[in-house]
Image (cartoon, coloured by chain):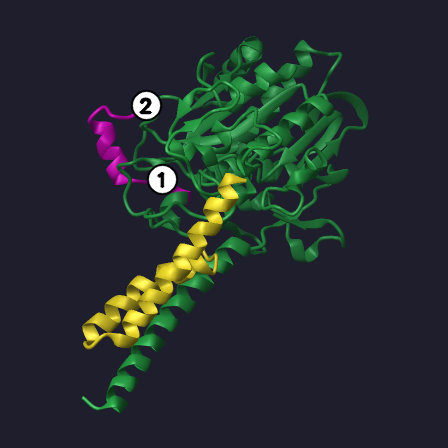
Amino acid sequence: MSVHLVLARKLLVAALGLWLFAAAGLSFYRSRHLPEPVVLGPGVTAVRQLSEFLPALKGTANDCHLYVLDGKEPGGTVLLLGGSHAEEPAGRLAPWLVVENAVVQRGRLIVALSANRSATTVTRPNGAYPPDFQIPTAWGAQTFRMGDRWSNPLDQWPDPEVYIHYPSGQNLAYVDIRNLNRAWPGRAHGTLTEQTTHAFMELIRREQVDVAIDLHEAELQYPVISAVVTHQKGQELATMVTMMLTDMEGFNIKTEFSPPNLHGLSHREIGDFSPAVSLLFETPEPFLDATRGITSRERLLTGQDEFVMHAGRHGLLFEKIDEKGWPIAVRVGRHTSSICQVCETWTESRPDRPVAVTGVPKYADVIKNGVGYYLRNPQGAEAGRVYYE
Amino acid sequence: MPMVIVTALYYVMVAYVSLLLIWSLVKSPRWERDVLYILVLIPFLLRLFRLK
């Protein structure tokens, strides 16, 4: 073969490679840098940064926004942690609706929509996850990053052979060193994920947070599902909340107690290392199940999955599922109602530290109107009232 | 600090392997090998350019 033919062949293959590299790289870059608009609702009085509580976080992927909703009257403080596990979209969308709609009458809400922002910029390797998903609204569709359970390896790497949790010394799975909900209470000079939880702990202590709520979703093959998980300090609160929700809102939700010897989780460590009551909400997300079907955008939002249903027929699930699935509106509505109920029940039990919130769409509202109905159009927002996650 | 050192070494190794793959691509005698090297090279380049 002549030199020219060989050269032409090499150039052709190199061009093919360059095209594949550019296509993949552009997709990854766009996904990592996709701006997610947040329109500040009437109740947002300030937007702060997590790095205020640990300057080392400044300039990192995890220097997330903190949306502060101050009440007209003083009272207690409730912290909402959205996006601890970024691939659990109801855990981000529910506090999103709070930021864009809630008005606090008494007390204060502090809301993080991307508690582990790094994890929102990557999807799980080998999972064929969509890079993003869209929520339809009357003014168009709003696009959100799909995210992952763990911090992006670009921001924190390498992983150890075994993750030794600080300060308990408990051995955990190696990959969970990048799992925000295995890194509480964190440390100032630790990994990015540990620094993030440390900053939140500082926030909780300095801002005198009374109740910290960590919002999640769970696979149906996981026993802790459709539940409020509580530290022992919050047992009465959580039990009353789940009773009220089951009775008044029409969905079943149970109370689970945080195991004292299982470390790194928010419901354990926030309660142990601060005066706050720590709660964690779980709602069903079939998309996370090991026996799920194709990981499509549609399946993420409808929660319909014949393979998970099949697992259910064999008694392998801890939550029911039928042809209706678990639509995103149902999952988000469960969380928003649970947030409202915690505030109500907390205020009744601690009238000296009230947190009274209005304007948050509840379970029936979100199911009736859809999640997008409560998202505000960033195009029509006032100047300075749009932030990006 | 150990994580920073390991990460830096990792990127050096990724760059080195990328160069080896490019060299192998240049020297390979068959087109099937060319395609193989280019496909193997892509994830190395993505990581080197911090695209994930």
Callout 1: helix, strand or loop?
helix
Kind of residue at disc 1: Phe
The label on residue A70 is none
- The disc, 1 or 2, on the residue closer to the chain's N-terminal end is 1
Q: Which residue is mark 2?
A: A318
- The residues colored magenta run A301-318
Residue A36 in the image: x percent, y percent? Answer: 58, 51
Q: Position of residue B44 (x, y in %)?
A: 37, 59
Q: Amino acid at mark 2?
A: Phe
| Chain of the residue displaying label 2 | A
From the top left corner, tell me how far across and down residue A210 is, in percent: 67, 18
State left or right for residue A144 relative to residue A51.
Answer: left
Within-10-Å neighbours for mark 1: few <14, some 14–19, many 20+: many
Q: Which residue is mark 1?
A: A287
Residue at far right of view: A73
Assess whether residue A310 is covered by the magenta stretch.
yes
Q: Colour of chain B?
A: yellow
| Chain letter behind tag 1 | A
- Camera-side residue: A161 or A387? A161
Which chain's colour is green?
Answer: A
Location of residue A295 with respect to A261 vertically, above or below: below
Q: State the residue in front, A151 or A384.
A: A151
Q: Nearer the viewer, residue A343 or A160?
A: A160
Q: Position of residue A49 (x, y in %)?
A: 69, 40
**What residue is at 30 percent from the left and 68 percent from the top?**
B38
> Which quadrant of the structure image shows residue A222?
top left
Q: What residue is drawn where x is 52% and y is 18%? A: A268
- In terms of image quadrants, where is residue A25? bottom left
Is A373 on the left or on the right of A305, as rendered?
A: right
Left or right? Give the position of A253 relative to A299. right
Q: Is residue A250 magenta?
A: no
Q: Are marks 1 and 2 on the same chain?
A: yes
